[in-house]
Every structure is written in structure tokens, then in C-alpha cells.
């Protein structure tokens, strides 16, 4: 029984194997042509299924395409029903995007601005700045990506080409170093009075 090509982006199994080999060699030409031809199918699926706006559906499709490509290279995708897998991944990504967007919206419903919830003196701010500047570049960058840019640790791990565990441990060390440096400088300031 021959596999249904429509379920596999019109690729035969040998063409699929060729796609994988070319991707592993750094050649994205075939991948781009296959997935560009099917991008609108995914966008329309998300629009109809989730009543998604075009831009959000496009973003989910594009992020899924990047993830799908990596999975192909890593050997985590097998031939059989590629279209279904791709649409499922895009759907899950879209739902995650909407869930995280809903969390952001709900935090805006506080009556008091966040600045009023935290009280920090000028001396504490200077001590924190000193402790921050004593951190190494790698720690400052990781903490900035996590706390300021709002990136999750697994996204940072991908960006820095490290494992999730390594990034989590590095974050713990960086926070501990920041805390200890802050306390050291704070204690030194307190001793002056």
C-alpha cells in the first residue's frame, strides 16, 4: 500500500529521506520549497480551527516550521503523516502563545502600578547596581534574558546552545553570586554608619 502523499507534503518516502540528508548538509532549499508551498494551509487551518488572526497564525506557523526543521535534523520525525504532525505542533504552539498572552493581559488588571509595590532606597539601589556590575558578562546576560526580556530558561538554553539543566544551574549560581555580592556591599555600607 502506497502512502498518501497529501499527508506527507507531497513527498514520497525517498524524497523525505533526501530532504533529511540535504538538511543535515546545511542545504535548506528543498525544505523551504516544500514548507513554503504548504504555509498557507497551516495558516488557514489555525484561522478556521482557533479563529486566529492572520498575524498570530503566521507567527505560530513560522515558529513551528523552525522547530519542525530542527526535529527533522535531529531524527525525531518519521515519514508517515507529516502534515498531521506539523498541524498538531502548530496548534499546540498557537495555544501556548494565546495562554501566555492571556497571562500578560491578566497582570495588567492590578489597580496599583508595580512600581508602588516595591520600595527601595537610593542606597539599596546603588548597592544593587554595584553587585550587578561585579557579575560576569555571562551571568548578566543570562539574568537579563530571563528577568528583563522574559525568556524561559529552555529558550535561553536553545539560544546559548546549552542544556536546560546547565542553564538552570548557571542561573542559580548567578543569583547566589548576585545576592552574596549585594549583601557584602550592603554590610560594608552599614558598617560605615
Image (cartoon, grey):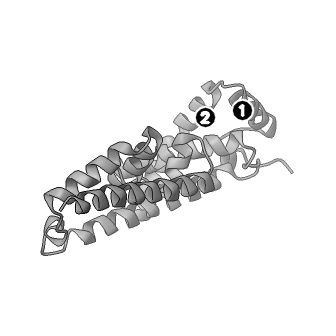
The image quadrant that residue 35 belongs to is top right
Q: Is residue 14 left or right of residue 177?
A: right
Residue picked out by circle 2:
34
Q: Position of residue 94 (x, y in %)?
A: 45, 58
Q: Is residue 60 left or right of residue 38?
A: left
Q: Position of residue 95 (x, y in %)?
A: 45, 64
Q: Any mark on residue 184, and which?
A: none
Packing grade of label 1 (10 A; few <14, some 14-19, many >=20) is many
In the image, farthest residue toward the right: 1
Residue 72 in the image: above or below residue 90: above
Q: Position of residue 65 (x, y in %)?
A: 55, 43
Secondary element type, mark 1? helix
In the foreground, 177 or 53:
177
Packing grade of label 2 (10 A; few <14, some 14-19, many >=20) is some
- Which residue is at 24% across, 63% downward? 190
Residue picked out by circle 1:
19
Q: Count how many numbered circles sit on residues in the image.
A: 2
Any part of residue 90 in sight:
no
Q: Position of residue 113 (x, y in %)?
A: 14, 68
Q: Is residue 64 left or right of residue 147?
A: right
- Which residue is at 78% across, 35% downward? 17
Any part of residue 35 in sight:
yes
Secondary element type, mark 2? helix
- Which residue is at 41% across, 43% downward? 141
Q: CA distance from mark 2 to mark 1?
A: 9 Å
Asked whether disc 2 touches disc 1, contact meaning CB atoms under 8 Å apart, the reply is: yes
- Which residue is at 18% across, 74% downward? 110
Q: Nearer the viewer, mark 2 or mark 1?
A: 1
The image quadrant that residue 147 belongs to is bottom left
In the foreground, 73 or 42:
73
State which quarter of the image contains the C terminus.
bottom left
In the foreground, 85 or 126:
126
Amino acid at each position: 500500500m502506497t502512502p498518501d502523499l497529501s499527508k506527507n507534503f507531497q513527498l514520497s518516502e525517498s524524497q523525505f529521506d533526501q530532504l533529511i540528508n540535504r538538511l543535515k548538509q546545511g542545504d535548506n532549499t528543498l525544505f523551504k520549497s516544500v514548507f513554503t508551498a504548504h504555509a498557507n494551509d497551516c495558516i488557514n487551518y489555525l484561522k478556521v480551527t482557533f479563529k486566529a488572526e492572520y498575524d498570530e497564525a503566521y507567527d505560530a506557523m513560522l515558529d513551528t516550521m523552525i522547530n519542525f526543521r530542527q526535529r527533522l535534523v535531529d531524527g525525531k520525525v518519521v515519514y508517515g503523516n507529516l502534515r498531521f504532525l506539523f498541524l498538531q505542533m502548530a496548534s499546540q504552539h498557537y495555544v501556548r502563545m494565546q495562554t501566555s498572552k492571556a497571562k500578560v493581559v491578566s497582570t495588567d488588571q492590578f489597580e496599583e502600578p508595580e512600581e508602588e509595590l516595591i520600595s527601595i532606597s537610593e542606597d539599596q539601589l546603588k548597592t544593587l547596581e554595584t553587585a550587578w556590575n561585579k557579575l560576569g558578562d555571562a551571568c548578566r546576560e543570562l539574568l537579563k534574558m530571563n528577568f528583563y526580556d522574559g525568556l524561559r530558561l529552555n529558550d535561553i538554553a536553545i539560544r546559548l546552545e546549552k542544556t536546560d539543566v546547565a542553564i538552570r544551574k548557571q542561573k542559580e549560581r548567578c543569583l547566589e553570586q548576585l545576592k552574596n555580592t549585594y549583601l557584602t556591599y550592603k554590610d560594608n555600607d552599614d558598617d560605615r554608619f
